[in-house]
Image (spheres, rainbow, N blue to C red):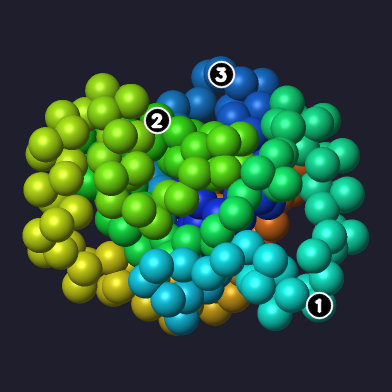
């Protein structure tokens, strides 16, 4: 069963959504799921060097302490995530983070890189738009740091990454996380694990009928 996830590593709801999908799959261990992480930039016009966090919050929320943070902290704690929003000093451009995710996924490290990017940003407040930090993150999950640095410097995959995001927007995706199960069924937002079960059941039933 293929599950495509449109996500952005600076999206706290995407981190929560990842945890909830993992929980759903753990409840249904008989399923063989192949998870693929897809590009979606929440801030596609973000300057390459990012933006000071206070400036970003003021521009987007007109507040340095948006009320949604209290909700996110509560929901995050229920999923074992302790958001350290106060430690985030810069809102980065995430294009290179998506490029690294694509690169790592091709080597079988997709979930590991996504998890580590989330933790680097939301737990440690790291600038995940910085290529040196991204290279260190690649090394942290077991990738060759020189190869990762060379890949990021080459910019050879930019067209494919942009195509992937453009395809998602053509599908009508306007926010993330956005889950597509078996290429046919969609779940939008960081839904509870139970929201996935009807889709899992439909795919399993379709596969059973096809097999017979």
Bin the neighbour count of mark 1 within 10 Å (Cα to Cα): few under 14, some 14-19, many 20 and up.
few
Q: Secondary structure at mark 3?
A: loop
Q: What is the distance, in whole Å, between disc 2 and disc 3 at their CAs?
A: 20 Å
Residue 19 horizontal/vertical position (percent): 64, 34
Q: Earlier in the sequence, mark 2 or mark 3?
A: 3
Bin the neighbour count of mark 3 within 10 Å (Cα to Cα): few under 14, some 14-19, many 20 and up.
few
Bin the neighbour count of mark 2 within 10 Å (Cα to Cα): few under 14, some 14-19, many 20 and up.
some
Please tell me which residue lies in front, 51 or 80: 51
For image coordinates 66% across by 21% down, the residue present is 27
Please tell me which residue lies in front, 41 or 191: 41
Please tell me which residue lies in front, 74 or 192: 74
Residue 37 horizontal/vertical position (percent): 41, 49
Label 1 or label 2, whichever lies nearer to me, is 1
User: In the shown orientation, is residue 59 left or right of residue 177?
Assistant: right
The vertical placement of 195 against 34, above or below, is below
* Observer able to see residue 198: no
Mark number for residue 62?
1
User: In the shown orientation, is residue 36 left or right of residue 53?
Assistant: left
Proximity of marks 1 and 2: CB atoms separated by less than 8 Å? no
Q: Secondary structure at mark 2?
A: helix
| Rendered image quadrant of residue 207 | top left
Q: Earlier in the sequence, mark 1 or mark 2?
A: 1
Kindly identify which residue carries mark 2. Answer: 112
Mark number for residue 29?
3
Label 2 or label 3, whichever lies nearer to me, is 2
The vertical placement of 165 against 111, above or below, is below
Residue 198 horizontal/vertical position (percent): 69, 44
| Rendered image quadrant of residue 197 | top right
* Observer able to see residue 25: yes
């Amino acid at each position: 069963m293929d599950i495509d996830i449109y996500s952005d590593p600076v999206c706290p709801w995407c981190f929560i959504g990842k945890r909830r999908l993992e929980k759903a799959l753990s409840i249904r261990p008989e399923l063989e799921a192949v998870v693929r992480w897809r590009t979606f930039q929440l801030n596609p016009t973000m300057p390459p060097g990012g933006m000071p966090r206070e400036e970003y919050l003021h521009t987007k929320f007109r507040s340095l302490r948006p009320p949604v943070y209290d909700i996110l902290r509560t929901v995050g704690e229920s999923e074992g995530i302790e958001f350290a929003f106060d430690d985030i000093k810069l809102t980065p451009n995430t294009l290179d983070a998506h490029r690294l995710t694509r690169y790592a996924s091709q080597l079988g490290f997709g979930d590991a890189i996504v998890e580590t990017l989330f933790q680097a940003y939301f737990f440690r407040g790291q600038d995940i738009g910085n290529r040196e930090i991204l290279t260190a993150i690649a090394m942290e999950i077991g990738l060759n740091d020189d190869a990762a640095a060379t890949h990021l410097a080459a910019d050879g995959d930019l067209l494919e990454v942009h195509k992937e995001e453009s395809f998602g927007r053509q599908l009508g995706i306007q926010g993330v996380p956005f889950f597509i199960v078996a290429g046919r069924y969609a779940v939008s937002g960081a839904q509870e694990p139970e929201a996935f079960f009807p889709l899992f059941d439909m795919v399993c039933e379709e596969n059973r009928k096809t097999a017979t």
